[in-house]
């Protein structure tokens, strides 16, 4: 396996709001230049910000997001970019009214995929409750959190979505990254020891089917 992106989102919304969000048409987030993550492994203090990268392919992302699909369809497609179903997860906790999405291995190593994911999560603005939500994209799954770089952190609330800055928004940014890493570790539990096994067998359910059932 190469070094793909890992993506995680957590959104707080009740059952009716969840359905409205999933059924709403997708649209570009648009504020790509606000992202302050790094695309190389030099970490948060080095590397090139996304806004300066020579080829983020925003045009392709905007075409994907305006093709008439709803958020459910966009998330379905995103989950299917995982190298195996066991490396993605969807969970909705009706008691906590919290949706969590994880994709450990976004296997197309291109900027369009993280931009796509962040836009789709940003579409939850106006649907989330007062607790809001967030999304995180990290770049290096293995060997552990200390070797991953954060490519982008998005905060979502009732009025919109905005990129968090690692210094100006240090508390919220750090909390989101820690929550994402915990979700990555929980989703990937046991996978390292199953080398050679079919990834299709690493999961007890299909995350896409779980999404369709919401």
Image (tube, rainbow, N blue to C red):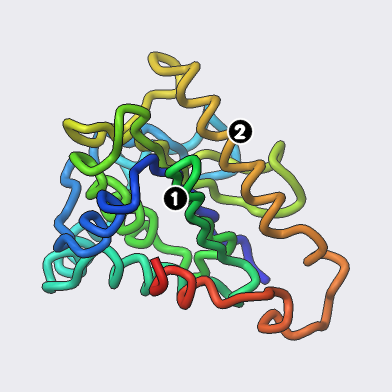
Quadrant showing the N terminus: bottom right
Indicate the quadrant where residue 24 lies: bottom left
Q: Residue at x 17, y 54 (%)?
A: 28
Left or right placement of residue 137 versus residue 194 in this view: left
Which residue corresponds to mark 1?
99
Given residues 185 and 115, the one toward you in this image is 185
In the image, residue 39 sits, relative to residue 130, either above or below, namely below
Indicate the quadrant where residue 125 lies: top left
Q: Residue at x 24, y 55 (%)?
A: 21
Given residues 49 and 93, the one toward you in this image is 93
At mark 1, the secondary structure is strand
Disc number for residue 211: none
Contact (Cβ within 8 Å) of mark 2 with mark 1 = no
Tell me where residue 20 appears, x and y as whole percent: 21, 56
Which residue corresponds to mark 2?
178
Tell me where residue 44 appears, x and y as whole percent: 53, 29
Indicate the quadrant where residue 178 lies: top right
Residue 155: in sight, yes or no? yes
Q: CA distance from mark 2 to mark 1?
A: 17 Å
């Amino acid at each position: 396996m190469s070094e793909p992106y890992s993506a995680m989102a957590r959104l707080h919304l009740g059952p009716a709001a969840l359905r409205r969000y999933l059924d709403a048409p997708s649209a570009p987030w648009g504020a790509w230049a606000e992202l302050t993550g790094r695309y190389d492994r030099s970490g948060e203090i080095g590397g090139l910000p996304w806004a300066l990268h020579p080829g983020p392919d925003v045009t392709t992302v905007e075409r994907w997001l305006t093709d008439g699909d709803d958020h459910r369809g966009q998330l379905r497609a995103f989950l299917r970019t995982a190298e195996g179903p066991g490396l993605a997860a969807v969970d909705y906790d009706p008691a906590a009214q919290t949706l969590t999405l994880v994709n450990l291995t976004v296997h197309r190593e291109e900027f369009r995929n993280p931009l796509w994911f962040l836009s789709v999560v940003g579409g939850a603005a106006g649907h989330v409750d007062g607790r809001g939500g967030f999304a995180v994209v990290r770049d290096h799954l293995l060997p552990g959190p200390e070797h991953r770089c954060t490519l982008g952190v998005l905060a979502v609330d009732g009025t919109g979505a905005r990129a968090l800055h690692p210094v100006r928004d240090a508390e919220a940014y750090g909390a989101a990254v820690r929550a994402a890493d915990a979700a990555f570790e929980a989703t990937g539990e046991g996978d390292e020891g199953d080398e050679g096994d079919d990834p299709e067998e690493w999961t007890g359910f299909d995350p896409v089917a779980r999404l369709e059932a919401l």
